[in-house]
Structures are given as C-alpha cells and as structure tokens.
Amino acid sequence: VCAPAALTDILKLQALFAEVAALLNALGARWLLSHGSLLGAWLHHGPIPWDEEGDILLLPRDFAVLKSALEGSGQAFARTVQTPKGAIELISGPPLGALRYDVHEHRDTSGGWVATAVTFRLASEARNSPVQLDAFLARSNGSHAWTDSAVLPLEVLVPSRWLRLFDWLMPAPFNPKAALELWYGPRFTSRRKC
C-alpha cells in the first residue's frame, strides 16, 4: 500500500502547476501533461495520491521558447555531474518570480542525448525539495516525438485535449490512453511505483 503524499505537498504541487502554467502561457509556449501527471489526471482526475512530482512535456519549438526565457533571466550556475550512465550538465538558475529552476541535459557514456528537462520548484522551497515539476523536452522528427522513456507518434500528442488535474482543466495529449501505454505499458492502470 502506498502512503499518500502530505496535504501540504499536494497544495505546493498545485501552486507549482499554476505558476509554471502562468509562465508558459505568458511565453506562448504550449505544453501537455505527461508521465505521472497524465496518469494521475487519467485515473484520479488529480495527482497520483502518493506522488509529489509533476510532469509536463514540451515539443522542441516550445521548449526553445522556455529555455530562451530562462537563459535571459539572470546569472546561472553551471556544473557537470558524472554518473555511471554518463553525465548530467546542470544549470541552476536564479529565482524567477515565485519559481526556481534547474535545467539538466542528460548524456550517455558516449556523449549521446538521453534527456533534457527543466525542473521547477517554488522559490520558497529548497533546491532539494521533493515537490517539483519536470518540463521534459520531447524531441521530434516530424512524425514522432520522443523523451527518455518512450517514442510517441505525433498524432497521439497533438492536437491537445483537456483533462482535469486539481481543480482545473489542463492540456493533455490527444490520445491519453495511447500515450500512457507507450510510457508505462498496456497494464498502466495497475502499475504502482511504490
């Protein structure tokens, strides 16, 4: 049995979604619920009860808009972290309104791209806070998009539709069930992280 996330963490995650959505909307960057947040919206009409993380996906043009805005937001601190599977280039940016962020680029041992994401936290929280929202880059070749964990036909993702998460409707993949099956397998409704 999974222990539910603390109510304070759920409320922080809700505030984090609101802040990130406001930022992306102000930039004109389109985004979609993804990974665990999509699973929560599909199964629970809210976050997964035991998860204090949020997940969204941006296609390349929209991710570039976000990254450009973050690069212009002030002094950032960059470092590279070596891991057994490769390296992570980590850029910790300054507070941006109510948000703080880290941009991380993951590469395998041969230098090949694995994943790119921006991790947002509330500016009032520590950088190691478990309450975070990951905005993943989904690379695209015109017919498919891919993240670190799945390759999805673009017709599964766009045009977007709306799903309820927390108390409002959020943009989600056009075919949420197909996206979840590609991320988690055909038995995604019975899969448990904990």
Image (cartoon, rainbow, N blue to C red):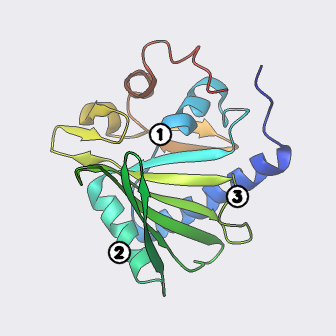
Quadrant hosting residue 173: top left
For disc 2, the marked residue is 68
Amino acid type, callout 1 = Ser
Foreground mark, 3 or 1, reads 3
Q: Secondary structure at mark 3?
A: loop
Q: What is the distance, in whole Å, between disc 3 and disc 1 at their CAs? A: 21 Å
Q: Position of residue 9 (x, y in %)?
A: 78, 49
Q: Position of residue 128 (x, y in %)?
A: 67, 60
Question: Any mark on residue 122, and which?
Answer: none
Residue in the foreground of this view, choosing between 164 and 36: 36
Amino acid type, callout 3 = Ser
Q: What is the distance, in whole Å, between disc 3 and disc 2 at their CAs? A: 25 Å
Q: Callout 3: few (<14), some (14-19), or many (20+) C-alpha neighbours within 10 Å?
A: few
Q: Can you say whether 166 is above or below 123 in the image? A: above
Q: Earlier in the sequence, mark 3 or mark 1?
A: 1
Question: Any mark on residue 34, and which?
Answer: 1
For disc 3, the marked residue is 129
Q: Position of residue 169 (x, y in %)?
A: 58, 43
Residue at the right extreme of this rendering: 7
